[in-house]
Amino acid sequence: MVIAFRWLLRLFLALVAVAALIVLGLYYFATRSIPDYSATHRVGGISAEVEIVRNNSNVPHIFGATDDDVFFALGFAHAQDRLWQMNMLRRTAQGRLSEIFGPRTLRTDELMRRLDLYGLAASSVAAQDDATRSALEAYARGVNAWIAEVNEQARGRGAPEFFLFSNEIAFWQPADSLALLKLLGVQLSGHLAQEVTRARLSLVLPEDRLRDLLPDDPMAPIAALPDFAQLFPEVAPSHAALAFDQEPLSPFPAPGLAGASNAWAASSARSASGGTLLANDPHLGFSAPSVWYLARLELQSGGVIGATIPGIPAVLAGRSERLGWAVTSSYLDDQDVFIERLNPDNPEEYLTPDGWAPFETRRSILRVKDEASRTLTLRWTQNGPILPGHHYDLASITPPGHLTSVSWTLLDPSDTSMTATLRLMRAQSLDEALASAPLFIAPSQNLTLVDQNRIAMQMVGAMPARHPQHQTQGRMPSPGWIQTNRWQGLLPHSSNPAFIDPETGILGNTNNKIIDRPFPEHVSHRWGDTQRIQRWLRLMRMRDVHTRDSFIEAQLDTVSTTARTLLPLIGADLWFTGEAAPENTPERRRQRALILLAEWNGEMNEHLPEPLIYAAWMRALQDRLIRDDLGPLADQFRRIEPVFIERVYRDTDGAAVWCDIIQSSPVETCTDIARMALDDALVWLGERFGPTIESWRWGDAHQATHDHPVLGDLRVLRHFVNIRQSTSGDDHTLMRGATSGRDPDPFHNVHGAGYRGVYDFADPDSSVFIISTGQSGHPLSRHYDDLGDLWRRGEYIPMSLDPDLARAAAVGITRLVPEG
């Protein structure tokens, strides 16, 4: 027995030793791809030695003899820290994800091939000016220099993910960077989904109820449009849920989660320091690592510092010595869906205003891991590419014998947006920056600018010219064979709204409506914000002059004007009614919740229970209001629609009719629905967070989900690669943290400010910035998440162009030396 025990013990110890050796081996090979930031590399493609000084936050400050050398080094630094991310973004734009992930990404790949984003990017290389092409080529050489180093020096395949998936890394091309800029436009797009949603709803709701759920801006009344059934009577109404693809690697945003952002500026007259101020926090979906990467470039025109996207050789939001620029989604309606009629005698033809015409057709082979390749037939019409019916549930609104196509400014084969971006980086004044604006095509943005004395906001991006007699005004899919529905070219750049040196000295945008013009120069029927702008206006008006700190305070503000507006309306007949109910009863629990909400100031603070009660109540309330009318189609509205709820509880245009449950005999009042919804919410919260209301915390439900898009779902690895943080704010606060709306965690924070920057031109080196994770994409690097804690606490790091500050306590200085 003793002998057997000894042998079992020896076997156990041997297994432990083998396991330890395996773990150590895996760790060794995985860490081989963590770059040495103090190394010297001999590389081809630069004219003189280049220094990459990484400060103590791992932000590279790049110094070179020429601009091309600097862009080379930026490509080298991006590849060192984010090679896997860059490769995935490129594969997404190319429609080549299925080569390594198999069938689960087929739908995404198919759509990207049909849009031909990569082919259009390759075509647009020739449209760039000489300086931009030179920068793109230099950047690509820098990326490729690191890829060559990975291949020759066995640096862990460049990233740990390459051990689990294909380790094929094609060399970088200028077209790759342009494709990533177009991919950003995909992530910011939302009008296509809105057109489908409006079409579906118009089939099941009368016009006045559709106006409640998808309200027009009250400042912009329009004549009634035909509903979708009038245009296409062959389409049957359906209450089935919209089938939107939510594959983690898909770049197409979930409904309601297209791009968003905040930006505001103050002139020197409204600044306590006497210099202009600028704040910016663009909002995109969270991921680990963040899509943003901080960098400083010392160009011949001067230093530039701010937020880049790995794969794109540009500071997309940031500042130089003399200029600051910020971006927010403009919500320009730059997409139109068309229903194309097929020739019943020849399915290779479609109807145009001039009769039948053949599709422009070509084949594309889509390779799939572990399965046979697919051959796609890609078809384009005069309006744009034919899209698959499963994308955004287009099949549900497409009549028999028809297909759908899309017109989109992003599909311009001569897109000069990269040239515009690089010219903006080099601009020395507001006027020089504005001169680059006509070259922006897509994605459309509101560009907020400040120089040392002046401020401006210019909407950039091509505006489609629509005919005044367009049947749906671009709000729903329309017949593509009718000439007045088609785009009539593009509007001149002078049509783009611009606000230069306003008398008030303050400019800002929270994706709110920026201009009130009639169709067809309306910019958009649908805007990204009706709530945050109200809080921003209040904060700006509270002070005669502003400071860097007051701009930071606004950027981090978590007070919900929406909660302050809705709660008094919804709870008007519920507050303090009746005697105290017995303990441990639903009535008593409801009373305790109402007492907490009555004393709450609307601050969506992560440490409080009130925001959680409010959010759960509004979610349950909205579902009760619309579920009986829409059925599963109500799943489209997973996040609170505050304008809809306000219309119902103010009975605007008879909207209180939503409160009556049509399947029940009694006529329910809005007070009845509010009470039942609160009880629903409290039951759900009790099951999820325990019976003690006072112990509930908004932050437990509102965790920021910086998840790795590939490894984040794997059972063991997800604990190492995903970053979760308790956060304040919600969908409608200035410090925006958009909720997922999806069970089982409907309040997870999935979309927000991955980058924040505040620039003070009275003292530029006191400017600050931050990103939501860390600079490195390597999960074993200490810089994978080191900036995340600062971001969560509302802290920043210095945004200085002083080279001595960069060198002080630097984590390393990388030197690139020309070969030979």
Image: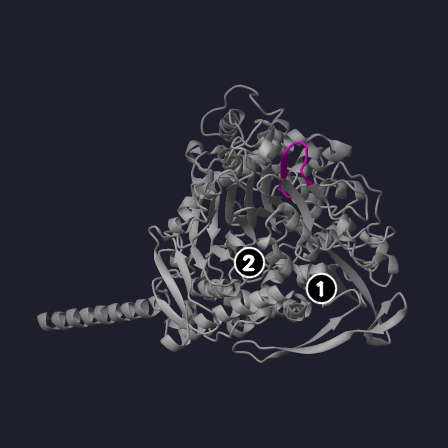
Compared with 820, 655 (above or below) is above
Q: Is residue 156 magenta?
A: no
Snapshot quadrant of residue 719: bottom left
Q: Which residues are magenta?
A: 500-511
| Sequence-wise first label, 2 or 1 | 2
Q: How are the residues colored? A: one colour
Q: What is the quadrant of the C terminus in the image? A: bottom left
Tell me which amino acid carries mark 2.
Ala
The residue tagged 2 is: 314
Tell me which amino acid carries mark 1.
Asp
Residue displayed at 66% across by 41% down: 512
Can residue 513 be seen?
no
Q: Residue 13 in the image: x percent, y percent? A: 18, 69
Front residue of 410 and 581:
410
Residue displayed at 64% across by 28% down: 569
Compared with 432, 173 (above or below) is below
